[in-house]
Image: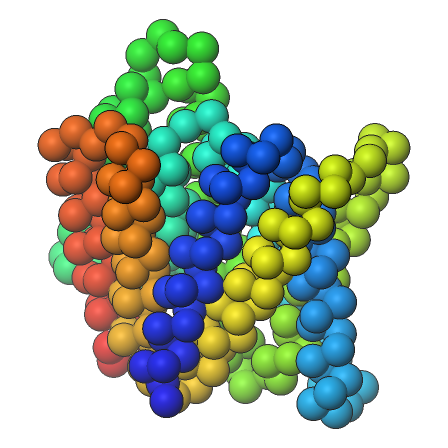
Amino acid sequence: MGFLYIFLVVLGITSVAYLAKLSAGKGVSSFDLTFVMFTAAGVLGYFFAEFNNVAPACYTVELWSVSIPAGIGGATAVYVFNNAVRIGHFGYSHAIYRSSFLIPVVISVVFFGSRLNIAMAVGISAILASIILISWSNDAFSKGPNNLLWFLLSICAFVLSGLPRIGQLLASHNRMNSFAYLFLSYAVGFAVLFIIFLAGQRRIKIHALFYGVLAAFASYVGVYCTLEALKLLPAAVVFPITLSGPIILGMFISFVYREKIRLHGWIGVFLGVCGITILSLQTYAA
């Protein structure tokens, strides 16, 4: 059952990113897609929590403290990533975005005294080298009008998406109720986007409803199955597959769409997958 959850995670994560690309072709803005996605995911989370009889006692201070940063980071990361996809390479944007597993590892070393051994240093170096090679392959450091902007957006999405990674791990490790965590984290993300929506007096395009609802369902399935997989399988098994799998599928989608992929770009993706695998094994194998 654990590997079925992993398969659904890979499918869900990849679908969310691919819907960002498809919606861009229909003229749906990044904000509209993100807003509808988190609105629908929050509603979905509420009904699943009610259907599964989540008791009020499950909404502890500890759960709130984990869900708030995860929700804020998740909403802003998705918004920024959707912008990056609209101006740059899909596969490369996704590869950098999904390398965010590096963030909780670095935080554990810097702030929580985790031991940095040679293998972990190699894994961190591999992911950093991956980001540099991928960005170079996409001409991020040339003088094109959107090249540097794409790079900055991809890096911001990479950093911000580290927060929901930490939230998922803490929620699973501390055996928090998965449905309660999902509802709160998506609700917090919605609240942030709703404030922006009101401040900007925006109107959501009708096309955004279709893509946003589909993305919400795929995202919800991906996060829920991640939490359930972590309860059944070691994190050293779950994270390498659920983070590397979407990267590989994203590159396949780029190949199908004939986006230019240079040799050093492929090397960068390979290094990123290797780095994620090494860090997962070193961080969680024990």
Kindly tell me whether residue 28 is visible in this rendering. yes
**In the depicted structure, whether residue 269 falls above or below residue 104:** above
- Give the image's coloring scheme: rainbow
Give the residue drawn at x 54%, y 62%: 219
- The answer to whether 232 appears left or right of 216 in the picture is left
- The answer to whether 165 appears left or right of 56 in the picture is left
**At which x and y percent is residue 74?**
58, 53
Give the residue drawn at x 45%, y 73%: 226
Residue toward you, 280 or 212: 212
Which image quadrant: the N terminus?
bottom left
Give the residue drawn at x 12%, y 32%: 263
Kindly tell me whether residue 128 is visible in this rendering. no
Which image quadrant: the C terminus?
bottom left
**At which x and y percent is residue 55?**
77, 90
**In the depicted structure, whether residue 275 falls above or below residue 203:** below
**In the depicted structure, whether residue 215 falls above or below residue 280:** above
**At which x and y percent is residue 220?**
58, 67
Residue toward you, 202 or 67: 202
- The answer to whether 155 appears left or right of 75 in the picture is left
Give the residue drawn at x 49%, y 67%: 222
